[in-house]
Image (cartoon, rainbow, N blue to C red):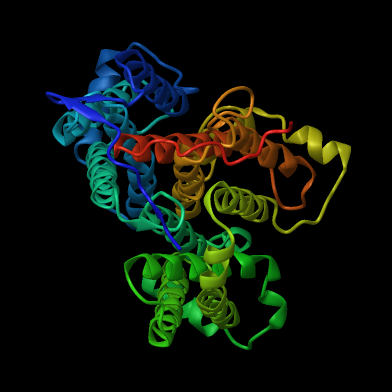
């Protein structure tokens, strides 16, 4: 029923990893590229002015700013952005045990540099809070990715449906689902200018949640949560028997999780829809029940590269559903041409324009969605050589989905999305390879 990982392929020499394809040039290049993107996004239109006296005054204000509710929103955005710094630093390390301290110091120095330069800008506001949240984000990202790498390493040689531990796939996908429930794609416009705090917004959202309306349910979201229930059952199956109580427990956790996340987004003014909560929970339960019924037969009849190919192509199709909802085309030439602007074509520029929770959570969601695909392709590449080797088809998929936004109602082209997706692919691939896994073979059959 399961694949078993072959004996450890990597050999260690001191604290170096022999067999991992990462090199010092790649490590330095990846880190420099990430820092360059952050600097480009945060310092664009800085309007730098050399005025030491004005800069000193702005610095004084930067260290004396008081905390407000808006600072919490900015903090979430900063943590999400600089968590990527911690992740990149760890996965590109050439040592066997990367230093979390070094990653955190690098993030702190980068943040301090950005805030210091903003002191010389008449249109920017520097803040010590940003330095703290950016540093915290770097630390969180480094610790999280290192914990994931160690968890994957511990599962090396254990039974697996796909030749790679399901825990990394489940953790990433459930994280993406949590982001969706916390900031629904088509209900992410916050109520602002009401002069009330988070608890007041929550009370207002709860009061406006009734009466129920079936039109609030988006059927395109059903397969997303259905897949969540399915992969959790796969995780259970790798650790033991898939029982009816286990499926029921998954259904209960789906209901509790959906309720908590949907109610939580009322704190920042997003509408709460109980019919959507119920639909999400039922979808998770349905996915879990279907997996329990179908998984044993599927694993007996579909094995090796055939199983891997089916899962990879199926997950790619699922990403198309995520990326092209609501599937309503629009070929208006004016609307399409307007999407080719600075905010959409410059990395992270669109996030700077929209200062809300969605802009931060969407970064994490897009990243997490592509981690499972990168992890799968690390052990089952479609091809080991040529155009379709390793991550190439997944990268083409990410950019293709983003290009498709040009002709979908309520979706917009954004280079940032594609770049974040590629980052998720690369991190998923590197984590699995760093953990000692090697390709089993090609999952796509060759033509004779």
Name the image quarter holding residue 302.
bottom right
The percent coordinates of residue 120 (x first, y second) are: 34, 19
In this view, the residue in front, 437 or 126, is 437
The percent coordinates of residue 364 (x first, y second) are: 44, 48
Residue at the outermost right position: 332
The percent coordinates of residue 44 (x first, y second) are: 48, 23
Task: Give the quadrant of the N terminus.
Answer: bottom left
Query: In the shown orientation, is residue 316 left or right of residue 24?
Result: right
Camera sees residue 197: no
Query: In the shown orientation, is residue 387 left or right of residue 114?
Result: right
User: Residue at position x 42%, y 28% from top?
Assistant: 42
User: Residue at position x 36%, y 23% from top?
Assistant: 21
Query: In the shown orientation, is residue 103 left or right of residue 416?
Result: left
Task: Give the quadrant of the C terminus.
Answer: top right
Residue at the outermost left position: 14
The percent coordinates of residue 443 (x first, y second) are: 58, 41
In this view, the residue in front, 423 or 388, is 388
Camera sees residue 290: yes
Name the image quarter holding residue 16.
top left
């Amino acid at each position: 029923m399961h694949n078993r990982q072959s004996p450890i392929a990597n050999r260690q020499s001191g604290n170096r990893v022999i067999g991992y394809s990462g090199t010092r040039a790649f490590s330095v290049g990846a880190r420099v590229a990430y820092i360059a993107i952050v600097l480009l996004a945060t310092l664009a239109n800085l309007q730098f002015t050399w005025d030491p006296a004005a800069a000193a005054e702005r610095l004084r204000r930067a260290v004396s700013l008081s905390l407000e509710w808006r600072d919490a929103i900015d903090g979430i955005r900063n943590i999400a952005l600089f968590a990527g710094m911690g992740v990149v630093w760890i996965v590109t390390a050439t040592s066997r045990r990367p230093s979390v301290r070094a990653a955190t110091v690098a993030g702190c120095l980068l943040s301090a540099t950005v805030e210091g330069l903003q002191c010389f800008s008449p249109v920017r506001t520097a803040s010590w809070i940003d330095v703290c949240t950016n540093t915290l984000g770097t630390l969180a990202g480094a610790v999280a990715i290192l914990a994931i790498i160690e968890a994957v390493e511990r599962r090396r040689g254990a039974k697996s449906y796909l030749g790679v531990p399901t825990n990394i796939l489940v953790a990433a996908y459930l994280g993406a689902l949590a982001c969706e429930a916390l900031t629904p794609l088509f209900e992410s416009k916050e109520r602002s200018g009401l002069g009330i705090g988070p608890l007041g917004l929550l009370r207002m959202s709860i009061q406006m949640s009734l009466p129920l309306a079936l039109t609030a349910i988006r059927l395109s979201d059903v397969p997303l949560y259905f897949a969540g229930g399915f992969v959790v059952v796969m995780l259970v199956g790798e650790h033991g028997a898939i029982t009816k109580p286990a499926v029921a427990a998954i259904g209960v956790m789906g209901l509790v999780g959906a309720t908590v996340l949907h109610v939580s987004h009322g704190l920042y003014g997003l509408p709460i829809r109980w019919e959507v909560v119920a639909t999400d929970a039922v979808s998770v339960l349905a996915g879990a029940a279907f997996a329990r019924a179908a998984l044993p037969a599927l694993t007996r009849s579909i094995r090796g590269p055939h199983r891997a190919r089916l899962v990879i192509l199926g997950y790619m199709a699922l990403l198309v559903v995520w990326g092209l909802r609501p599937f309503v085309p629009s070929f208006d030439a004016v609307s399409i041409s307007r999407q080719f602007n600075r905010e959409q074509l410059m990395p992270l520029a669109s996030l700077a324009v929209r200062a809300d929770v969605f802009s931060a959570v969407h970064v994490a969601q897009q990243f997490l969605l592509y981690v499972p695909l990168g992890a799968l392709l690390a052990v089952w590449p479609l091809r080991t050589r040529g155009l379709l080797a390793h991550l190439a088809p997944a990268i083409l998929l990410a950019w293709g989905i983003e290009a498709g936004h040009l002709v979908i109602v309520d979706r917009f082209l954004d280079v940032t999305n594609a770049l974040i997706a590629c980052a998720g692919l690369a991190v998923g691939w590197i984590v699995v390879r760093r953990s000692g896994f090697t390709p089993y073979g090609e999952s796509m059959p060759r033509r004779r």
